[in-house]
Image (spheres, helix red, strand yellow):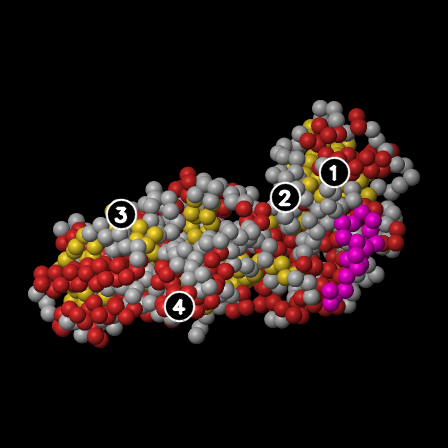
């Protein structure tokens, strides 16, 4: 049996109220009031499509051992690097095996489902037992545009495999068109879009139904027998109509998540699919479809194994952890929509030695340290001479991963002197359950909510962006967990 | 056990510039200024100097790498010159080099110079760390500054001793107010203004819980010492009782505080270790009674508070009581920072260790004017570099 073996989701903590956007930019484009309901998910200043993908991937690893992953397919239209595999960066952060395949699927918002089909093909062909599909987007809309209101940030992960399948893959149907509802040239920071009415009537309303109808016919499934169907369409009133016209029951149509996240691009079908899986029961038929340069539609049937899958946060879990991002100007600066005075300290960026990074790739990207075989002391960064003063053994170390260990705050500060896009820069020393310490930046928190002894979890984040050299540097930050 | 440095080396002369935002001068000018005062005090000629050491830290904004700038500036005649850099202990390291040269007999007279020109970065505070900790640490270290890294110890102190941040901040404010009172009396100090505890408490936060007045001045400056044997000192200055080095200790972290799981985050282990070794070397049994005065590394007020305890002057967890009692004030039992400290004299890193020794030396010689401490016997200096969890410490004791 081939299908989904685990899943994960991630919606960044910050939500931007669309009224805030309208309040800032409505003077320029009053018609945006029509879609200015709810909130959109917005990446923190230290998040991008890679870090969000890693978060969704880590979530999925709660349901499957990382040693079982034979490949990573990463879909995004906002890959931080054009040349340097972003799937490779994510695989390093997830601390997966070295003997795996990885590939980036880019340049169309349907690439998330395309990567899913490619992963299923590889598993069906017995070339791999499990392929992790990551889909993540950090969507950029010009200030005052409609898409600024429509777009959101987020990521989803589906692991496609052939053992302990929670949702069996029943078939797929694809249509591919060079339908230019929006595009972005190689060097452009923003999309250009065609008229919305044309996109709605000739795009969403034609292409998605064609793919869904084709899938139903190919798999000989009736629309009314489908428990859940997920597909994007940021036109709220038209979204459900696409499905009901085909005979899907209204309650089977998963919402377009406009009010919660906005359209997360390549990630959106997977984000909605992960959301749907959280409520799925054995026997449910679920369809995941995409839109953008055509459409892919995939049919799954949920198995009994879904009851065994525990500990996954999913999209619903991360939707619950949210904080308002305001004012609008803060959002605009986080996304580099407007230039801000960085100061000389903010402009300084030390160079990145890639040879150093390569030697220490598991330590930096995977947060892997060492544990002394003689005294069981975990230590980060990796040591050759044991730091335990009563031990001091030399070269008696085994590798020890810290990214999945629970930590508590030992001490912290909020630093107004160091440059940060979100001052104060909060950082401190954390202690890991089981031993070991890490001095690192904190994120997704407010200084006044941070306490000594508070639990933290580790999150892979962009540590710096060296704009002179175009280098995105990544490391692990601590996210204080606020009990709600 | 080694016999130690005690009474083997005498300070023949010292000099120190005015510290501050010396926009009009180069580091080289500062060296000349400190050197002139020092040579006049020592009463020797340039040809008498056998070897020299130069302490400086941030070579990016100072005079660059190597010791070349020292002899080229002073036109020292092809003698040995060595640059030493050990964060905030750099100045004391240069003194250690010169002292060891004399103690070993390799030199009769040696010069130690420390100079730092920090105000060429274009912004407040110290230069960013960048790759200062190496290319690997650049990839993993937090976006930290010096005040932030020391603020962690304030948080740690509150947690360990169950002190509220407000109570700690009030005690820290008293530390800074005391140093401002002393600095106001010192013509060479960078910051010469009395400030009240209320002013300190209402100042902007730099790195929570530390505010503006919890942080020392970032300054330009240079300081200089000439050391020799006690015998030569007595010969050259027959009417003066020489000021002798009683102890000179350095302790550097082994990594335990940052990487092992037993450091309490509320003290500095290197200071604790260096102090214990220095007291043993100097033969000091009860530091609280025997040390007459001290200049400690108050880069931040919390550092000074922790240092009181690490030096075994205040009992662990009880420094606040001594602060409240005025124990460390200029008129207290053990005056600390009589020259204003790093807080107000300023902190040109490479010069600071020598600046502290300059104050202790002048006090021991009775030359400190209205800041003069009555009849001091032993003066202690202390430098702390790096971060509380990853530090470099020097402790020196001098006396007659």
Rounded to the nearest angstrom, the CA distance separating label 3 from label 4 is 40 Å
Rounded to the nearest angstrom, the CA distance separating label 3 from label 1 is 58 Å
Q: Position of residue A21 (x, y in %)?
A: 44, 64
Residue B196: within the magenta? Answer: yes
Looking at this view, is B185 or A50 the one in front? A50
Structural crowding at the residue carrying mark 4, measured as other residues with C-alpha within 10 Å and reported as few (<14), some (14–19) or many (≥20): some
Q: Secondary structure at mark 2?
A: loop
Q: Nearer the viewer, mark 4 or mark 1?
A: 4
- Which residue is under mark 1? B25
Q: Which mark is residue B121?
A: 2
Structural crowding at the residue carrying mark 2, measured as other residues with C-alpha within 10 Å and reported as few (<14), some (14–19) or many (≥20): some
Q: Quadrant of the N terminus of chain A?
A: bottom left
Q: Return the disc, 3 or 4, that comes first in the chain's sequence.
A: 4
Task: Give the quarter of the image for residue B266.
Answer: bottom right
Which region shows up in magenta?
Answer: B180-199
Structural crowding at the residue carrying mark 3, measured as other residues with C-alpha within 10 Å and reported as few (<14), some (14–19) or many (≥20): some
Structural crowding at the residue carrying mark 1, measured as other residues with C-alpha within 10 Å and reported as few (<14), some (14–19) or many (≥20): few
Rounded to the nearest angstrom, the CA distance separating label 2 from label 3 is 44 Å
- Which residue is under mark 3? A103
Q: Chain of mark 2?
A: B
Rounded to the nearest angstrom, the CA distance separating label 4 from label 2 is 48 Å
Residue at 79% x, 54% y: name it.
B192
Q: Chain of mark 1?
A: B
- Which residue is under mark 4? A33
Rounded to the nearest angstrom, the CA distance separating label 1 from label 2 is 15 Å
Same subunit, tags 4 and 2: no
Q: Return the disc, 1 or 2, that comes first in the chain's sequence.
A: 1
């Amino acid at each position: 049996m081939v299908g989904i073996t685990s899943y994960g989701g991630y919606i960044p903590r910050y939500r931007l109220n669309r009224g805030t956007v309208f309040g800032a930019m409505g003077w320029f484009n009053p018609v945006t009031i029509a879609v200015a309901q709810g909130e959109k998910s917005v990446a923190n200043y230290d998040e991008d499509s890679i870090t969000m993908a890693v978060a969704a991937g880590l979530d999925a690893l709660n349901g499957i051992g990382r040693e079982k992953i034979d490949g990573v397919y990463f879909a995004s239209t906002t890959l931080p690097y054009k040349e340097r595999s972003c799937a490779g960066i994510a695989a390093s952060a997830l601390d997966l095996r070295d003997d795996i395949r990885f590939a980036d699927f880019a340049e169309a918002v349907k690439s998330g489902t395309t990567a899913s089909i490619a992963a299923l093909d590889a598993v069906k062909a017995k070339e791999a037992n499990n392929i992790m599909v990551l889909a993540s987007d950090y969507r950029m809309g010009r200030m005052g545009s409609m898409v600024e209101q429509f777009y959101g940030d987020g990521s989803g992960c589906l692991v496609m495999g052939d053992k302990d399948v929670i949702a069996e893959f029943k078939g797929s149907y694809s249509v591919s068109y060079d339908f230019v509802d929006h595009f972005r040239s190689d060097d452009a920071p923003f999309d250009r879009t065609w008229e919305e009415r044309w996109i709605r009537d000739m795009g969403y309303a034609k292409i998605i139904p064609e793919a869904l109808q084709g899938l139903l016919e190919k798999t000989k499934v009736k629309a009314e027998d489908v428990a859940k169907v997920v597909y994007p369409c940021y036109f709220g009133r038209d979204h459900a109509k696409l499905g009901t016209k085909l005979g899907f029951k209204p309650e089977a149509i998963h919402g377009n998540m406009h009010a919660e996240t906005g359209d997360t691009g390549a990630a959106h079908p997977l984000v909605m699919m992960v959301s749907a899986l959280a409520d799925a029961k054995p026997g449910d038929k679920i369809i995941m479809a995409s839109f953008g340069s055509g459409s892919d539609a995939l049919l799954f049937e949920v198995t009994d194994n879904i009851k065994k899958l525990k500990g996954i946060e999913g999209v619903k879990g991360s939707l619950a952890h949210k904080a308002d991002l305001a004012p609008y100007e803060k959002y605009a600066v986080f996304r580099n929509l407007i230039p801000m005075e960085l100061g000389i300290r903010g402009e300084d960026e030390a160079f990145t030695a890639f040879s150093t990074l390569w030697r220490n790739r598991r330590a930096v990207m995977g947060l892997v340290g060492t544990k002394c075989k003689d005294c069981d002391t975990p230590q980060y960064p990796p040591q050759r001479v044991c730091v335990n003063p009563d031990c001091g053994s030399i070269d008696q170390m085994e590798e020890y991963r810290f990214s999945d260990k629970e930590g508590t705050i030992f001490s912290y500060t909020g630093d107004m002197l160091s440059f940060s896009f979100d001052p104060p820069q909060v950082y401190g020393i954390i202690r890991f359950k089981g031993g070991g310490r890490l001095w690192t930046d904190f994120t997704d928190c407010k200084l006044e909510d941070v306490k000594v002894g508070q639990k933290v979890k580790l999150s892979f984040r962009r540590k710096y962006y060296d704009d002179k050299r175009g280098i995105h540097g990544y490391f692990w930050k601590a996210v204080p967990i606020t009990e709600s | 056990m080694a016999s130690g440095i005690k009474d083997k080396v005498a300070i023949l002369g010292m000099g120190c510039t005015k510290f501050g935002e010396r926009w009009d001068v180069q580091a080289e000018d500062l060296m000349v200024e400190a050197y002139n005062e020092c040579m006049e005090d020592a009463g020797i000629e340039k040809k008498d100097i056998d070897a020299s050491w130069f302490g400086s830290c941030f070579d990016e904004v100072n005079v660059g790498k190597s010791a070349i700038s020292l002899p080229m500036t002073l036109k020292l005649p092809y003698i040995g010159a060595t640059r030493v850099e050990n964060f905030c202990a750099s100045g004391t390291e240069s003194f250690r080099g010169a002292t060891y040269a004399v103690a070993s007999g390799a030199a009769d007279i040696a010069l130690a110079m420390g100079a730092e020109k920090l105000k060429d970065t274009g912004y407040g505070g110290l230069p960013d760390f960048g790759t200062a900790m190496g290319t690997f640490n650049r990839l993993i270290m937090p976006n930290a500054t010096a005040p932030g890294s020391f603020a962690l110890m304030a948080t740690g102190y509150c947690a360990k001793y169950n002190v509220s941040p407000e109570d700690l901040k009030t005690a820290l404010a008293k530390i800074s107010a005391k140093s401002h009172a002393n600095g106001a009396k010192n013509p060479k100090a960078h910051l010469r203004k009395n400030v009240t505890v209320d002013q300190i408490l209402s100042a902007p936060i730099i790195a929570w819980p530390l505010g503006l007045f919890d942080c020392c001045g970032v300054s330009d400056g240079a300081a200089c010492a000439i050391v020799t044997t006690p015998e030569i000192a007595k010969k050259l200055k027959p009417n003066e009782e020489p000021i002798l080095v009683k102890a000179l200790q350095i302790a550097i972290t082994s990594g335990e505080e940052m990487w092992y799981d037993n450091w309490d985050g509320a003290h500095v282990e290197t200071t604790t270790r260096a102090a214990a070794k220095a007291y043993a070397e100097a033969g000091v049994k009860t530091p609280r009674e025997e040390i007459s005065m001290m200049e400690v590394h108050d880069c931040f007020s919390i550092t000074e508070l922790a240092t009181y305890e690490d030096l075994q002057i205040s009992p662990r967890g009880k420094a606040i009581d001594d602060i409240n009692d005025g124990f460390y004030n200029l008129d207290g039992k053990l005056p600390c920072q009589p020259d204003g400290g790093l807080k107000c004299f300023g902190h040109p890193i490479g010069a600071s260790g020598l600046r502290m020794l300059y104050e202790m030396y002048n006090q021991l010689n009775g030359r400190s004017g209205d800041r003069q401490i009555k009849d001091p016997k032993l003066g202690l200096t202390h430098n702390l570099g790096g971060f509380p969890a990853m530090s470099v410490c020097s402790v020196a004791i001098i006396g007659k």
